[in-house]
Image (spheres, rainbow, N blue to C red):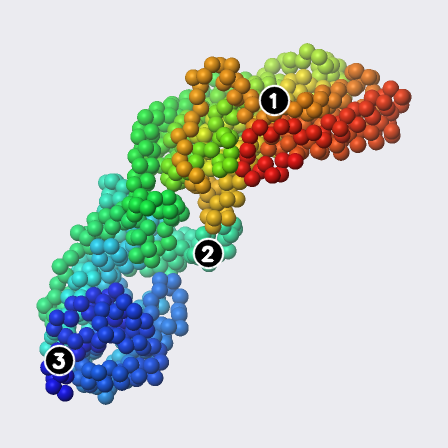
Amino acid sequence: MSDRQDRKPLVVITGAAGSIGTAVTRALADAYTVVGLDIATEGAACPCYEVDLTTADSIELALRKLSEEYGDDIASVIHLAAYFDFTGEDHPLYEKLNVEGSAKLLQALQPFQVGQFVYSGTMLVHRPAEPGERIDEATPVEPKWAYPISKARAEAAIRESRGGIPAVLLHLAGLYDGETAVPTLSHQIARIYERDLKSHLYAGDLRAGQAMVHVDDLVDAVRRTVDRRGELPEETTILVGEPDPPAYADLQDRIGTLIHGKERWTTLTVPEGVAKLGAWLETEGEPLIPDAIDQGEKPFIRPFMVEMASDHYALDIARARDLLGWTPRHNIRDVLPDLVDALKRDPAGWYEANGITPPDWLTIAAQKTDDPAGPERLRQHHRQDFRRTHRMTLWGGFLNMAVGAWLIASPSTLAYGSTAMAVSDMVSGALLLALGFVSLSAAHGWARWAAAAVGVWLLFAPLAFWAPTAAAYANGTLAGALAIGLAVLIPPTPGIDPVAARTGPTIPPGWAFTPSSWFQRLPIIILAAVGFLISRHMAAYQLGHIDSAWEPFFAGTRPGLNGTEDIVTSTVSEAWPVPDAGVGAMTYMLEFLTGIIGSCRRWRTMPWLVMLFGLMIVPLGAVSITFIIIQPIVIGTWCTLCLIAAAAMLIQIPYSLDELVATTQFLIRRKKAGRPLLRIFFTGDTDDGPWQPVSDDFRQPPGRVVREMLSGGIGIPWNLAFCVAIGIWLMFTRLTLGTEGGLANAEHLIGSLVITVTVTAFAEVARPIRLVNMAFGAALIVVALIYATGPLLMAADIVCGLALIALSLRRGRITTPYGGWNKGLF
């Protein structure tokens, strides 16, 4: 008994094993005997009894053990345990733990001599004030969402169940310290750190602020509450927090300055309805593409939060000063630099401590280095390099503004002859002026892509409006190409993930070379330029800018027209709503431009571009070949320029396939690694393997450069060369053997397909496709037996068919490895 009499006053803390409970325990330990109650006792800084506050039997058992060890005289019970989440949705534990648990605890404490019951409530139970006003303890209790509603109900239960136990209801502001903060603030910091689009948007009053309180100040307020337990009213409410919170806009600017060095972080006000719809689509709506929401985790901002965006909580803390002698010693404005420093010092650790899912680049960067500050250093180096390169290439933005000015003035000087085209070019010019100006800031990479989109329209506009003059067509074509080139061909390329830009291999794992090198892309770029010039000549004839089209070999089927003129004015061509040759020219120009964009690592830094590049070459190449196939069958003649353009398109196919394969392999690897496929598709990612400083060496002798350009990933086995020769022979049997009718059409069709398949098989990664020629060989034999009108024609086709089957059996040598792809190259 004497031990109990000599013991310091007993304080019981629920939730003692938590971070706040631990801090309060240590603050009271010098003057009080502190005992904890918690559902999980590990990590508690004091003796702690396990208890489930949702069960009366568990509470009574824990208190019985406490009584046996420490007696029935309790100076203060500090009730910290509660359920909390930021979903805004109701949860059974709000009622069972927060409300009923508080009542059950007080009921179980009735046999004890309790000097005080301290409840950790929240200021959010009060009706918010307007900016410029304050709330105090008399402000009506009008909670708006599940958590504060449960806290208000818990306080009502405390009043009903406390009996003769004095109660102090501490209405606390949002908590923070030098490393962690209340979710609203920590997520705000994270959004700005990540440059998330939502970091620039807000649906409420930018003057509104949320009061906060440093953990040390909270602990001090609790200690003072316990120390003055004999002086306080029987039941009282006390607001605890910093009285003058910074406005949301001020916080934005301060955080932006601390993280990114910006003097002002642009924040735009969004209508509440629009913000709620966006938040609902992100959290409740079914995503159009499942992978768009990583790992199934919902975003932090919920529709209910949008409704409270203008809620202002500035506090009148006169009662805390009068009853407790308490005022805060910290201010969020002063501690914010410490919060940001903690983020920069260990980004992954900061995100974990604040319970925030880190962005993908940060997770991968943390895996790539053992240094906690590694991710931040990577981000800073990427940012510095990006801005340095951007400063060196500001001329691109200025020149695009000049292109815009040129377009605005063009209609009045070039006599377009089309009001629609004049208006289109003037509007496009104004857009380029504005976007070029915005793109002078490194922070607005989107403006460069927007300028490129304007450039695409400029390429298409002369076709859409059937430009009546050559000047209008040429102006649109050149201005569009320049707009795209000046916007996105000039480094730095915007939109690439920092980790993708600064880590990972240049050569794909298991490969011997990078398929994105300049040596690999140059043949495509050159062929695209050839195709553009040819198609543009034919488009000029279709638009009526020239009187005749060049054709050295073939006559037309209509009087006065040669083969080229006949085909480009045929019913097939005129079925298009725009000049089809012009569409071809536009496609070749886009191939030319997209062939230039990106580094030798673009197979993993810009997957979307590689796929777009391949889409323009492979499927559109097939369309071009199809058009060649139908010329003699449907129209009855050939077009030399069409044949050259189709050949240019066809030869691009094998040169583009290895980069498509490398990018596909990369996306599959990252998907298997659990990475978000959709995001990686557009922003890139790192990959297995170290950083490799590989670059194309154009200082070699010209002959060696040409050999590297023509041979990378391409091989022409002798058997495939013979297949191409057979295909060409079959296409022109009308001229060589005089075949006619169904046989001539069938031979032409099979010959075209054989050439297409064989040239595609020149790519080592596509070598198995050569086996399709065996089916064409068999088809040719069947055609000969059905349609041949004489022994010579039949023998020629049968020999060609058997030769195709035999020649397709040999694969030819595969000179380099292509990762796991080689296993399928039979």
The answer to whether the residues at label 2 and label 1 have Cβ atoms under 8 Å apart is: no
Name the foreground residue: 249 vs 796: 796
Disc sitting over residue 7 in the figure: 3
Q: Badge 2: few (under 14), some or many (20 or more) residues near its Cα, within 10 Å?
A: few
Q: Badge 3: few (under 14), some or many (20 or more) residues near its Cα, within 10 Å?
A: few
Location of mark 2 (residue): 296
Location of mark 1 (residue): 648
Q: What SS does tag 2 mark?
A: helix
Query: For the residues marked 3 and 2, what is the alpha-carbon distance in whole angstroms?
Result: 53 Å
Q: Nearer the viewer, mark 3 or mark 2?
A: 3
What residue occupies the far top of the structure in this picture?
552
The amino acid type of the residue labelled 1 equals Ala
Q: Quadrant of the C terminus?
A: top right
Q: Quadrant of the N terminus?
A: bottom left
Q: What SS does tag 3 mark?
A: loop
Name the foreground residue: 61 vs 336: 61
| Residue 790 left/right relative to 369 | right
Give the image quarter of residue 556. top right
Q: What SS does tag 1 mark?
A: helix
